[in-house]
Amino acid sequence: MSKVVLSYSGGLDTSVCIPILREQYQYDEIVTVTVDVGQPESDLRKAEARAGKLSDKHYTVDAKNEFVEKYLFPLIKANGNYEGYTLGQAIARPLIAKKVLEIAEKEHVSAIAHGCTGKGNDQLRFEAVFRAAAFKIHAPMRELNLTRSEEIEYALEHNLDVQITFEKPYSVDENLWSRSIEGGRLEDPSCIPPEDIYKWTMAPTKTQGKLLLSLDFAKGIPVALDGAQVSGLQLIRKLNEVAGKFGVGRTDLIEDRVLGLKAREIYEHPAATVILTAHAELEALVLTREERKFKAQVEAAWAELIYQGLLDEPLTAALDAFINKTQERVTGSATLLLHNGTATAVARSSPKALYSEALVSFNDKSLDQRDAEGFSKYHGFQSRAYNKFVKD
């Protein structure tokens, strides 16, 4: 009997995959796997219900805490950001793939399948993990060159219970860190997104009031909100709720995909915006100028590797080693003001701060200002020499 494991989200693409794997790939048994990385509970239950009707066996794997502690905490330390994107889906895919691979090995299947298209990044992120194992890989959407409209028609013909229509053919993906919305008329970069695509964030123009909140960090990891100790999972969920009410965490960008295609992507990430803003502000207080300058280069390289799904690349581990070394002193607190879609740092403190109020104050004489004159004489020396040469 031929058996395949399918990475199953419960959405259109993966639901369509199940009958296709039976009809066109001739599999006798299909095992579906949904990995819980913070999707809404209602979505997980719907995925389980659909899988129960369509597949032969289904697994739901709870990976929320692992996602936070082993994936999101390193991302926070690295100020993870690719072209304005907080890497929510990118950082989750390798974890999902590894959990699917574990089930594939447990079930002794001959193949693994996923619902990614041939135009996006996720096919690479999944298969970077899958191809390390000795399984055949199927990607029906890519291999059959199916369009979104063809998928919807197929779903209607096969009476698949998927909540998507030709009028709203959006592809939505949620986890703890980010919610992405793409497809349909959003693919036109000149289209102003309708407000009904957003779920986590209120329109910044409709928010009311202001809110001050503080985040405490210990060695680069957020550990408390407004002085109260919380787990990473609790913190992210709370900030998504609180910051979303102030319109914080919307991104609408033109993104450069790994394949070279430019794509219009829309994301919601309230907690990510707050945490990354606070973390970067605390780093500014405790890291040296040279550390920050070099770390910015490391962060850019790290983010690109994560974007590509290359968590197992040796360079990623090497960059993590440098990042972790810098985080040994990133302990302290940052206070942010949430207002009209923005999260702005208004205060920060740390026992490891390199800042000296006494030395920088205009009312202190610990440093003799006259000592700076010699430095000033040489500052810009080559520029002045060059300009004099040009004028002569």
Image (spheres, rainbow, N blue to C red):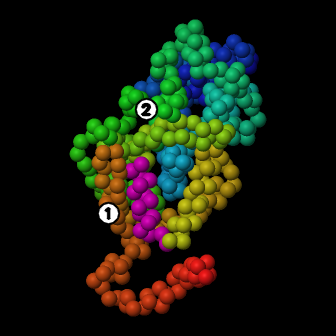
Residue type (three-letter) at the residue carrying disc 2: Ile
Q: Position of residue 54 (x, y in %)?
A: 57, 15
Whichever of callouts 2 and 1 sits on the residue coming sooner in the sequence is: 2
Report the predominant secondary structure element of the magenta stretch. helix
As displayed, is residue 319 above or below residue 193?
A: below
As displayed, is residue 31 above or below residue 330?
A: above
| Label 2 packing within 10 angstroms: few (<14), some (14-19), many (20+) | few
Quarter assignment of residue 371: bottom left
Q: Nearer the viewer, residue 326 or 391?
A: 391
Q: Which label sits in the foreground, 2 or 1? A: 2
Report the residue marked by disc 1. Answer: 347
Q: Secondary structure at mark 2?
A: loop
Q: Residue at x 52, y 30 (%)?
A: 188
Q: Secondary structure at mark 1?
A: strand
Q: Residues at badges 2 and 1 in contact (C-beta under 8 Å)? A: no
Where residue 192 is drawn, which disc sits there? 2
Q: Nearer the viewer, residue 28 or 185?
A: 185
- Residue bounds of the magenta highlight: 273-288
* In magenta segment, residue 114: no
Determine if residue 228 is in view.
no
Determine if residue 93 is in view.
yes
Q: Position of residue 142 (x, y in %)?
A: 68, 26
Q: Position of residue 197 (x, y in %)?
A: 41, 29
Q: Residue at x 51, y 34 (%)?
A: 189
Q: Position of residue 175 (x, y in %)?
A: 48, 37
Quarter assignment of residue 279: bottom left
Q: How many marks?
A: 2
- In the image as oriented, which residue stretches furthest toward the front? 392
Residue type (three-letter) at the residue carrying disc 1: Ala
